[in-house]
């Protein structure tokens, strides 16, 4: 089976979704327009995932970003990726709160892909106050580290 890759249109849709779902990830990347960051990491996660799941997600991105879906949603025939931020936020909110389960499911699939990818990035962990695993750093709080007393592992629990 050939290596999984998103099309240019799917990349635009994924980039727009990343920018709206995690705006903080794009505050400092004006030089590379964000494509080397979160969207690229999400695409890499899709490629490393089950190929069927990756292709389903790619198809959903194509449909979500299409003019036809915009018209069926009662909007002007413009792609999601071509709209401004406020319009994109309104569309995502409508899909998140939709009375149709399929729309909510598609929104959650996009949201979970983007958020799980973002919080797996090392720069995001520092932003939420995660200091890293204790074995790889010095204790910073009084309650961190080994318990005072006997170091033996064979004692009662």
Image (tube, helix red, strand yellow):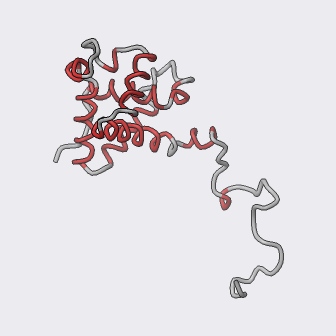
Position in image of residue 74 (x %, y %): 26, 17
Residue under the point 45% across and 34% down: 38
**Residue at horizontal 45%, vertical 17%?**
85
Q: Quadrant of residue 59?
A: top left
Residue located at (28% from left, 14% from top): 78
Q: Is residue 109 above or below residue 65?
A: below
In the image, residue 9 lies at what x, y percent? 26, 24
84 in relation to 137, above or below: above
Report the residue that reaches farthest toward the front: 99
Residue that appears at 18% across and 43% down: 2
Quarter of the picture containing the C terminus is bottom right
| Quarter of the rendering containing residue 135 | bottom right
Q: So how many labels did they put on this image?
A: 0
Residue 34 is left or right of residue 28, and the answer is: left
Q: Is residue 105 left or right of residue 121?
A: left
- Residue 25's spot in the image, x, y percent? 52, 30
Q: Quadrant of residue 123?
A: top right
Left or right of 24 on screen, residue 151? right
- Residue nearest the viewer, comparing 77 with 129: 77
């Amino acid at each position: 089976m050939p290596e999984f890759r998103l099309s240019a249109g799917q990349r635009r849709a994924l980039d727009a979704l990343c920018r709206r779902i995690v705006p903080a990830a794009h505050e400092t990347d004006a030089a590379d327009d964000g494509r080397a960051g979160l969207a690229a990491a999400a695409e890499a996660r899709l490629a490393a995932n089950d190929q069927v799941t990756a292709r389903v997600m790619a198809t959903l991105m194509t449909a979500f970003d299409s003019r036809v879906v915009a018209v069926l949603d009662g909007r002007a025939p413009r792609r999601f990726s071509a709209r401004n931020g406020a319009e994109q936020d309104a569309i995502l909110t409508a899909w998140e709160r939709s009375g149709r389960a399929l729309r909510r499911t598609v929104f959650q699939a996009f949201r979970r892909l983007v958020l799980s990818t973002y919080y797996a990035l090392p720069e995001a962990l520092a932003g939420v106050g995660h200091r890293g695993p204790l074995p790889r750093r010095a204790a910073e709080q009084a309650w961190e580290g080994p318990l005072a007393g006997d170091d033996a592992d064979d004692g009662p629990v």
